Image (cartoon, rainbow, N blue to C red):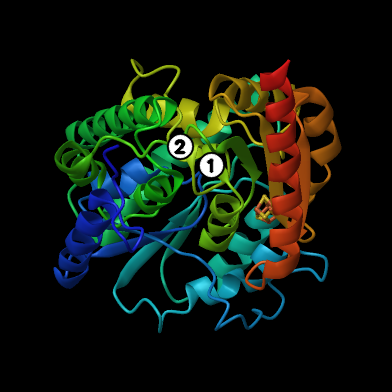
Amino acid sequence: MNKSYNEHGDSALLKRLRELEAVELQSGKPQVGWIDRRTPIELIEAAGEMPIRLFPSNIHNEKLPGAVRSDACSFCSTLASAFDVNHFPHLSAILTGSTCDQMRRMCEEVARTTTIPMRLISLPRTYRRSIDSYFLNQIDSTWHWIAEVLGVPVSEDSLAEAVETRNRLRVWVSELRREGWLSTRELHALAGSVLNATGLLKLMDETIQTPEDRSGSIRLALLGAVVGAPVLDIIEQSGGVVVYDGTNQGDSLFVEPASPQDTPIRMLYNYYGMESLEPARRPVMPALYYLKKSALSYGASGVILINPTHCHPWGLSAKIIKEFIGLPFLHLEEEYGSLAISRLSTRIGAFTEMLSMKRTGNDNR
Ligand code: SF4
């Protein structure tokens, strides 16, 4: 067996990525923050800026006055800390998308109060052709906004190249994931990296190794919103492996584009708007079909859906997702930034044990 992990659990890819990121962060290159998986990161890459994924810090989780409603999800409740300029002194701008109304409201409020130039591209909540031009215009005007705010020359050619390169990255990551050559931990690191798509393609080319044999593990699909490393640790410690990760740190950032031949702006419009499959969008059936197809095609034998407390898009969809997918299902709802580790371990452990017994039963038939 050719293991890709050393005794500290780091693969060659993760170790090299950390080295490259340290160099990149020291480079003095201008940085643009982004938050939501519906942010067209290609606009940042085409402008030659460094993409910095902003996450709330549970150390600095002060609420921004007026920014969040009392029933906001626990992710948005702490999101204001992600905009603390003291934590990110080199940010030139923030560009973000929105998966749900809560995220949109939060970002609108922050945009109003932050001193960093910020732009929000709102995802249309419904699939209606009548709102096409609204979203298309947002992408197009944001492209010009970036040039103006950052004072960098931008061109159609640089945007076309950024779009094409990130599409290649998506296709390759998807292939490697389907074949089990890229772990979920590596996937998360790529999804939140400060390297651009060109850098990530080169990194993968140099470091991808024969995967660890996980055939004895229980294959799981992970769905929902922000998760974090502790949940992956717990799943692995209980004998599971996440073969498909539909959360906002995983495979959903590397969906193969359905219409890669369009013009760059239209391609972004399709990918981030029309083809975007979120449970917050209506009608919800395309997202359900997509989640089911993903869980089954990656060979998952069970599904874990995890969302922060008060996350309506995922929390309220849990029942219908469970019924529609039809696989053994575990729904977890956790306070973002303060996971109840022992309770999670117990529930996930019981779930994987049940799946393991089921598999043994099937094998013995
Ligand atoms: S999808 Fe859920 S967790 Fe994410 S911002 Fe919206 S309500 Fe919060």
Which labelled disc corresponds to residue 214?
2
Rendering coords of residue 304 (x, y %): 69, 43
Quadrant of the image occupied by residue 326: top right
- Residue 134 lies left or right of residue 348; in this view the side is left
Residue 280 vs 309, above or below: the answer is above
The residue depicted at 17 percent of the width and 49 percent of the height is 153
**Looking at the image, how many numbered discs can be counted on the residues?**
2
The residue depicted at 42 percent of the width and 17 percent of the height is 259
- Residue 251 lies left or right of residue 72; in this view the side is left
The tag earlier along the polypeptide, 1 or 2, is 2
- For disc 1, the neighbor class at 10 Å (few under 14, some 14 to 19, many from 20) is many
Mark 2 and ligand 1: say if the CB distance to the nearest ligand atom is below 8 Å. no
Query: Does residue 340 appear anywhere in the picture?
Result: no
Query: Does residue 93 appear anywhere in the picture?
Result: yes
The residue depicted at 57 percent of the width and 39 percent of the height is 246
Query: Are circles 1 and 2 on residues that touch, CB within 8 Å?
Result: yes
Three-letter residue code for mark 1:
Val
- The local secondary structure at tag 2 comes to loop
- The local secondary structure at tag 1 comes to strand
Mark 1 or 2: the one toward you: 2
Rendering coords of residue 3 (x, y %): 29, 44
Which quadrant does the C terminus fall into?
Answer: top right
The residue indicated by pointer 1 is: 241
- For disc 2, the neighbor class at 10 Å (few under 14, some 14 to 19, many from 20) is few
Residue 26 vs 283, above or below: the answer is below
